[in-house]
Amino acid sequence: MIIFRCSANDSLGLGHLVRCLALADALNSFNEQCILVGPSNQFFIKEYDNTFVDCIEKTSWESSKKDATFIANLVKKYNASMVILDDYRIDDDYQLLIKKAGVSWLQFDNGNNKNIWADIILNTSPDASNDLYKDNLKNKSAKLLLGEKYAIIRSQFTSKIPKIANNSNYKKVLITFGGGNDNGAIIFVLKALLKNSSSKTTFLIVSGKLNSSNDFLEKWVKINGNGRVKLYINPNSVSKLFSSCDLAIISGGGTIYEVASCGLPMIIIAIAENQVRHAIAWSQKAKNINFIGHLNLLNERNLVSAFNQAIEGKGQSYNNLLVDGLGRERVAMEIIDRIKKYV
């Protein structure tokens, strides 16, 4: 049995939950049963209905000590062999209590220089390196899984031939800002580009069900879209929608990995401070990935300029697909190896 502790809500979005679901699905293929602790059941994705044998809602966070004690007790109750921690509230107190309880765990990390005692550390940012952990890695025998090779994305995203645009203009542009609140980014992009792009260019909007702006978006698109905008709210198969596009304008979160697996050029706009470093790392990965800044600091001119630059670079593709869709299997195998070795 493997226990996941994960966070997901309206403001945070569904990124943590989506990758935990994908990893649990991969672990299921190794005959490992999984339990999820944290997110409200209303956030679940239909394609993973049978991924967890039990889902325990725990949306409140009283303290690190109480939460870690709860997880440690679950480990004892189910005789769990491993814990997966995907919550950036995990601090020293939490980890030390888990360690004291004799629990082996994998920890998702974003390289924020916090002390870390986990047995397996997963950081999929392109700039993740061993040097990043030379000062704060407290478990010297820990396994470091670093870089986009270990990116955990949904199984619907499989390896594809990089998409090459052969048009004088991008015909279809994807706009998506994650599963939570887009903070007004979608309307900002549409207002700028509808009036500053070819009439042949259409925009495909993918918005998550937790985006509180969805009702407003539907009304705005109906009035201002001029037949050039299609809005999809919480679609079942986003991989087909992503792959149908020529360019993606997205936020700096986990969606980058899924878009990268489709081979799309990207313009990245951060909508949260914790996305900035991640977006910068990705922009240094390939010429046709362009991070243009935080939404709060942008104006229409910045975006239009980046869009025109993307058009001028038409036909460019990644030398290789940056995300091959196999990261979830690689991580699952590392977990299984750990269990076999120490349990």
Image (spheres, grey):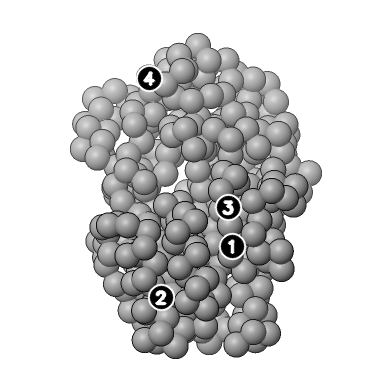
**Label 3 to label 4, Cα distance in Å?**
43 Å
Disc 3: CA contacts within 10 A as few (<14), some (14-19) or many (>=20): some
Disc count in the image?
Answer: 4
Work out whether 341 lies above or below 229: below
Closer mark to the observer between disc 4 and disc 2: 2
Residue at the spot x=41%, y=75% of the render? Answer: 72
Q: Residue at x 61, y 82 (%)?
A: 339
Q: Which residue is mark 2?
A: 72
The mark found on residue 115 in the picture is 3
Of the residues shown, which amino acid type is indicated by label 2?
A: Ala
Query: Where does residue 171 sit, x and y in percent of width and height?
Result: 54, 32
Where residue 35 appears, x then y in whole percent? 39, 77
Question: For the residue labelled by badge 2, is the local secondary structure a helix, a strand or a loop?
Answer: helix
Name which residue lies at 52% across and 71% down. 99
Q: Which mark is residue 191?
A: 4
* Contact (Cβ within 8 Å) of mark 2 with mark 1: no
Residue 142: percent from left, percent from top: 68, 66
User: Callout 1: few (<14), some (14-19), or many (20+) C-alpha neighbours within 10 Å?
Assistant: many
The image shows residue 128 at horizontal and vertical percentages of 68, 47
Residue 105: quadrant of the picture: bottom right
Rounded to the nearest angstrom, the CA distance separating label 3 from label 1 is: 7 Å
In the image, is residue 288 above or below residue 87? above
Q: Secondary structure at mark 1?
A: loop
What residue type is disc 4 on? Answer: Lys
The extreme right residue here reads: 319
| Mark 2 / mark 3, whichever is N-terminal | 2
